[in-house]
Image (spheres, grey):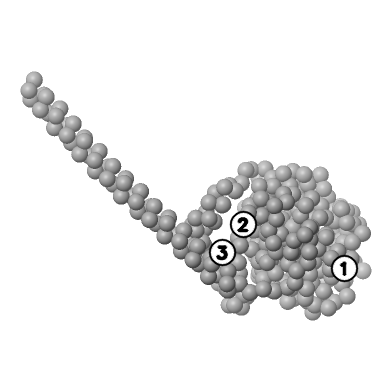
Amino acid sequence: MEHREALSMRRNAGMKKALRITLKTVGVLAIVIAVFLAAVFIVNQISTKSEQGKIETYGQYVTVDGKNMNVLIQGNGEETVVLLPGFGTAAPVLDFKLLIDELAPFYKVVAIEPFGYGLSDGTDKERTTENIVAEIHEALQQLDVERYTLMGHSIAGLYGIDYVNKYPDEVNAFVGIDSSVPTQPGVDEELPVKTFDFLKKSGLLRLAKKISGDPYASLAFDDHTKEQMRMFSNVHGNNATMLNEMEHIGSNFQGSKHLTFPRELPVILFVAANDTSLEGWIPMHEEQVKDLAHGQMVTLEGEHYLHHTRSKEIAKGFMDFMENIK
């Protein structure tokens, strides 16, 4: 009996010792994680303040809904092309630079930075398709732009199809750059808005970008533009206005499912040939143009941001398309 009690006491003592070691280890890890997160937060705050002072202005402001919306106008052509960015593009004017340079010798190019993007103000107004489209239209009215071609990347395909149905007498044509389709799958899934907000505010998003490498390294932008885009992404990316837009993505797609392009509107869609993230991506775009009087889909080798690597092909393909339907 005494031998059994001694064994039990030794076993209990061993368990208590192991528990103390485990608790100490957990405590040390908690302290290390807390120090790490604090360091990441402080570095992000300091870096953001420094980068804010280095971001350069461009374009001009127009007053929309009592706020400043930034636009860039380049080129003096008789016809106008209006560029609309994809979701989350921190500095649309810079992001479109290579394409603007290709189009500007032939057109008047108006690159719009919606609220929450680039140098434009943020807004508390809900980021519904209705509000976004109305704001873009108001910006063009302020600029006295009355007839134009809409050329949009990614989610601009969603806003664009709504736009051309609301203002059919103003739009000459629509050009999609790997543009969203109202009926594409997966858009009804809830997006991690709060997670992105935490990652942004904590500085972990900046750290993740640093670790993942430079997405602009192999692109044809000059070094100065690349650095400006990196700073815009760090400072302005995932701001409150963008996150509100993210919250509305599902409902915006749902509300546009019934929309199609007007039959007589010329539409050309440039689609990434290599995109395997969505099943049926190319057939969905073929479906969009098949019944149009002047509809065409063109596949281009490249990834989602086709205008980063295929700006020459997009500009030439668009001009050839418009020339052929005159």
Q: Which mark is residue 276?
A: none
Rendering quarter of residue 1: top left
Judging by the rendered image, the residue that carries numbered circle 1 is: 144
Residue 209 appears in view:
yes
Q: Earlier in the sequence, mark 2 or mark 1?
A: 1
Q: Is residue 320 above or below residue 131?
A: below
Amino acid beneath label 3? Asn
Amino acid beneath label 2? Asn
| Separation of residues labelled 1 and 3 (CA atoms) | 34 Å
Judging by the rendered image, the residue that carries numbered circle 2 is: 239
Rendering quarter of residue 120: bottom right
Image position, residue 191 (x, y; %): 61, 46
Residue 105 placement, left or right of 3:
right
Q: Are marks 1 and 3 in contact (CB under 8 Å)?
A: no
Residue 275 appears in view:
no
Q: Earlier in the sequence, mark 2 or mark 3?
A: 3
Judging by the rendered image, the residue that carries numbered circle 3 is: 234
**Judging from the image, what secondary structure is the residue with disc 3 in?**
helix
Residue 47 placement, left or right of 72:
left
